[in-house]
């Protein structure tokens, strides 16, 4: 091999060039001469030798050039790698879809904190799963946020509508089923309750659990069938006998009304205790309104198709009952179920038609009531109350007068007796077994579009029955104790949020151009300043966190896990006692009392007491969460709070002043100006194919609720973000959350049934079409669906 082709830095070349290699013998430091032996390692015992590849002074010019070139290339590689990484990171933060979105968040903060908690990840997953980023939000925002949700959800056969709230309700009820199906567990705040609270709490749990288990025992319910109702039938027959003179004994009629009223059955009228909105809302007043009926509204009685189905349901149920009276105790063996059903339905229709349109409450003395409706001995009836009132509130005066002239005067004893019996049957139909509940599903199917043969799971039925009974308050205790820590955290957030919303609306009042007189502006400000907010659950009477308070409240209720029917009777009697007999004894109205259960998911506004109630069932994802960034719930519960508050100033709410007294409190010019704005809003919704007048008050509240969202976003300072949602900025995410809460699917029948609320598509696209903030946030061009060139209505 030539020298030129020899391997660079080969072992042989190093050895040949080494001065030590020229001598075969080495001399040690003592002068001895030894033969050289190659060490097995690079380190000799006497003389240190560099490894061959580190021997100094043995690199050729070519090797040096290669080393220098490699170093330059390596440095360039590091530079290009750094630039590429930086470019990739910037690309990941730029929005990709849709093209109309801003390329950089306008409310970007210098230092952002990523939320990687489970709740944040869940929120991000749901948004990414629901939003269809292939669409343009400016074309149809409802489709943009809800199309994928709609395609991914099916309406169960037993439901007529599904949405976020119904899904939350289902989840809550599954949890309540688990709680009531297990042995007693002290779950309050993770700490064991001290005696005697622990004993009382266990007793309370046994009451609600026995009620639940008695409902779950379908075999026992089917076995008893209609027999538990026979004692009630016998009492009604004694009160209103079928006589030859065709006359109704007024004293006996009073006794029948009282007897059924104590069991929460109100055939002719219904008694409630409400604030005295005519004179002094702090005082309780007896109120007389329309009695219980079978169909949801007056219009249903004018619908031939609905009436045909209702008539058939009444006939089928009566046919079962008549056939089961094998001993002919009630004389039904010779009666025609069809003729009797017709008699009942026609009488019920007369009661419904007695309620005319319009709402003008009046305050009558007992003497005036007796003079106008002499068919009932009101003195005898009212004297049974613990504190007989001197005056009675009549919400619809024409109804009471029509009840006297068109209903009671022309009714014979047989019709009245059978109608009272029928109202008792209908009230307790759900506790009589499948033979009686089955026909009712035909009516439910006609009204709401559910599958008539579909049967909900028994636990769903039982939780629903208890939730709507007097025992629903007690059910709320075990929901709250099970979720206590989370509810308390969210409760504090909501209470803080309500203060922000109040300030936003209050700051806007001086700028309302349509308010003419300063006195009206002052009244609006006063009503807002005195508005109260109740969040979470009742801490009044009863206080659901206090076992002692609840034990006193339910002391008259006993439950038998083998007797569902009589458990319902006891629950209904307790409800009437607490809501009528006990309340009328009070000298003042308890403004802190709740008319909804803690496990509810609906926000409501009470116009008589001027308060907003936000139940504990709503204090969870996706509406609010202590971990998720605040701007995510501005469009959910923030909007809901603003919406409900504005019902204090809609066409009904503005008739009540800050103390809850009914009247015309706004000056005529202001009212006329508001009517003009309302007509503008009516016209806008009419353009979208919905009844703008029927949905006016909710559309008004929707629009102002979005104004609140916009103001909250302008003041928000959160620097927390959720990874994976960087396609949108914070304002956009708030609007997306608002729209996602409206995603729903309904049967055609349900859409026709609910006439006073705009369809969800228009609830999103309608109000937002006038939101400049929304249009700017999503860069919507003029003339698009979400930013049309039409006259804008001044809402607030």
Image (tube, rainbow, N blue to C red):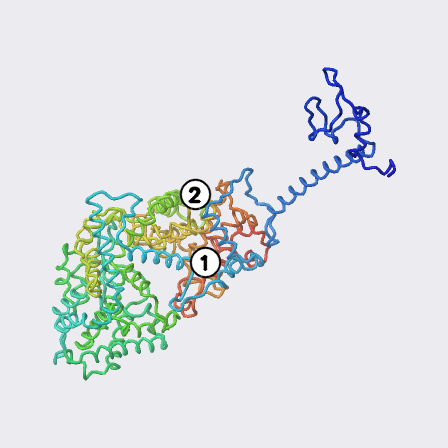
Q: Name the residue beneath numbered marker 1.
A: 742
- 703, above or below 15, in the image: below
Nearer the observer, 735 or 521: 735
Q: What crowding class fits label 2: few (fewer than 14 Cα within 10 Å), some (14-19), or many (20 or more)?
A: few
- 765, above or below 454, in the image: above
Q: Residue at x 39, y 52 (%)?
A: 646
Check contact, mark 1 vs mark 2: CB within 8 A: no
Coordinates of residue 691 in the picture (x, y in percent): 44, 65
Coordinates of residue 638 in the picture (x, y in percent): 43, 49
Q: Residue furthest bottom?
A: 334
Coordinates of residue 122 in the picture (x, y in percent): 47, 51
Q: Name the residue beneath numbered marker 2.
A: 507
Which mark is nearer the camera, 1 or 2? 1
Nearer the observer, 478 or 524: 478
Coordinates of residue 162 in the picture (x, y in percent): 42, 62
Q: Residue at x 37, y 71 (%)?
A: 454
The number of numbered badges drawn on the structure is: 2
Q: Quadrant of residue 108?
A: top right
- 538, above or below 364, in the image: above
Asked whether, in this view, residue 412 is left or right of residue 641, the answer is left
Q: For the residue labelled by badge 2, is the local secondary structure a helix, a strand or a loop?
A: helix
Nearer the observer, 422 or 567: 567
Q: Is residue 402 visible?
A: no
């Amino acid at each position: 091999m030539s020298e030129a082709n020899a391997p660079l830095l080969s072992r042989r070349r190093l050895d040949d060039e080494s001065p030590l290699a020229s001598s075969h013998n080495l001399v040690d430091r003592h002068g001895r001469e030894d033969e050289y032996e190659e060490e097995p390692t690079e380190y000799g015992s006497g003389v240190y030798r560099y490894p061959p590849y580190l021997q100094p002074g043995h690199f050729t010019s070519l090797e040096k050039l290669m080393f220098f070139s490699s170093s330059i290339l390596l440095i360039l590689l590091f530079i290009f790698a750094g630039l590429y990484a930086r470019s990739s990171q910037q690309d990941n933060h730029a929005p990709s879809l849709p093209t109309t979105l801003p390329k950089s968040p306008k409310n970007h903060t210098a230092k952002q904190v990523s939320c990687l908690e489970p709740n944040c990840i869940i929120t991000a997953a749901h948004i990414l799963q629901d939003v269809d980023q292939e669409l343009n939000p400016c074309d149809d925002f409802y489709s943009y946020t809800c199309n994928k949700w709609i395609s991914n959800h099916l309406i169960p056969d037993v439901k007529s509508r599904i949405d976020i709230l119904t899904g939350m309700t289902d989840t809550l009820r599954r949890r309540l089923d688990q709680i009531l199906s297990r042995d007693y567990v002290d779950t309050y705040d993770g700490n064991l309750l001290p005696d005697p609270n622990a004993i009382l709490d266990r007793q309370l749990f046994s009451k609600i659990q026995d009620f639940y288990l008695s409902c779950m025992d379908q075999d026992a319910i089917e076995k008893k069938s209609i027999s538990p109702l026979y004692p009630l039938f016998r009492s009604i027959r004694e009160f209103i006998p079928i006589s030859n003179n065709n006359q109704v004994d007024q004293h006996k009629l009073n006794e029948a009304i009282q007897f059924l009223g104590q069991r929460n059955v109100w055939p002719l009228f219904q008694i409630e205790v409400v604030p005295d909105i005519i004179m002094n809302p702090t005082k309780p007043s007896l109120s007389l309104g329309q009695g219980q009926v079978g169909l949801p509204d007056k219009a249903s009685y004018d619908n031939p198709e609905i009436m045909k189905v209702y008539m058939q349901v009444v006939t089928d149920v009566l046919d079962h009952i008549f056939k089961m009276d094998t001993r002919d105790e009630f004389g039904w063996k010779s009666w025609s179920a069809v003729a009797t059903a017709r008699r009942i339905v026609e009488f019920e229709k007369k009661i419904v038609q007695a309620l005319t349109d319009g709402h003008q409450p009046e305050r009558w003395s007992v003497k005036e009531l007796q003079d106008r409706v002499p068919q009932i001995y009101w003195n005898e009836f009212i004297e049974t109350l613990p504190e007989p009132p001197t005056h009675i509130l009549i919400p619809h005066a024409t109804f009471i007068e029509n009840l006297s002239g068109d209903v009671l005067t022309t009714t014979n004893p047989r019709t009245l007796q059978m109608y009272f019996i029928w109202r008792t049957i209908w009230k307790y139909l759900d506790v009589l077994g499948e033979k009686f509940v089955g026909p009712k599903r035909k009516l439910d199917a006609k009204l709401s579009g559910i599958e008539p043969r579909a049967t909900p799971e028994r636990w769903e039925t039982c939780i629903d029955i208890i939730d709507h009974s007097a025992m629903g308050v007690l059910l709320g205790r075990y929901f709250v104790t099970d979720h206590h820590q989370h509810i308390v955290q969210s409760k504090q957030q909501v209470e803080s949020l309500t203060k922000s919303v109040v300030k936003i609306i209050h700051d806007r009042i001086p700028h309302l151009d349509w308010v003419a007189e300063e006195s009206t502006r002052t009244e609006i400000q006063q009503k807002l300043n005195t508005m109260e907010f109740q969040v979470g659950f009742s801490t009044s009477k009863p206080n659901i966190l206090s076992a002692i308070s609840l034990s006193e409240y339910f002391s008259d209720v006993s439950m038998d896990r083998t007797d569902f029917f009589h458990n319902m009777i006891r629950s209904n009697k307790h409800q009437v006692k607490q809501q009528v007999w006990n309340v009328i004894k009070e000298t003042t109205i308890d403004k802190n009392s709740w008319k909804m259960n803690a496990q509810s998911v609906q926000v409501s506004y009470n116009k008589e007491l001027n308060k907003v109630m936000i139940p504990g069932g709503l204090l969870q994802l996706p509406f609010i969460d202590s971990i998720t960034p605040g701007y995510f719930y501005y469009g959910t519960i923030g909007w809901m709070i603003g919406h409900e508050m504005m019902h204090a100033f809609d066409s009904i709410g503005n008739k009540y002043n800050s103390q809850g007294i009914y009247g015309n409190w706004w000056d005529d010019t202001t009212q006329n100006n508001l009517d003009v704005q309302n007509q503008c809003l009516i016209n806008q919704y009419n353009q979208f194919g919905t009844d703008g007048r029927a949905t006016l008050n909710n559309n008004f509240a929707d629009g102002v609720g979005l104004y609140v969202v916009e103001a909250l976003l302008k003041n928000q300072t959160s620097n927390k973000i959720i990874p994976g949602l960087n396609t949108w900025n914070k304002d956009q995410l708030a609007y997306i959350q608002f729209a996602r809460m409206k995603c729903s699917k309904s049967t055609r029948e349900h859409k026709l049934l609910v006439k006073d609320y705009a369809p969800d598509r228009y609830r999103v696209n309608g109000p937002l079409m006038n939101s400049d903030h929304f249009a700017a946030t999503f860069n919507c061009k003029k003339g698009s669906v979400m930013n049309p060139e039409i006259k804008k209505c001044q809402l607030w």
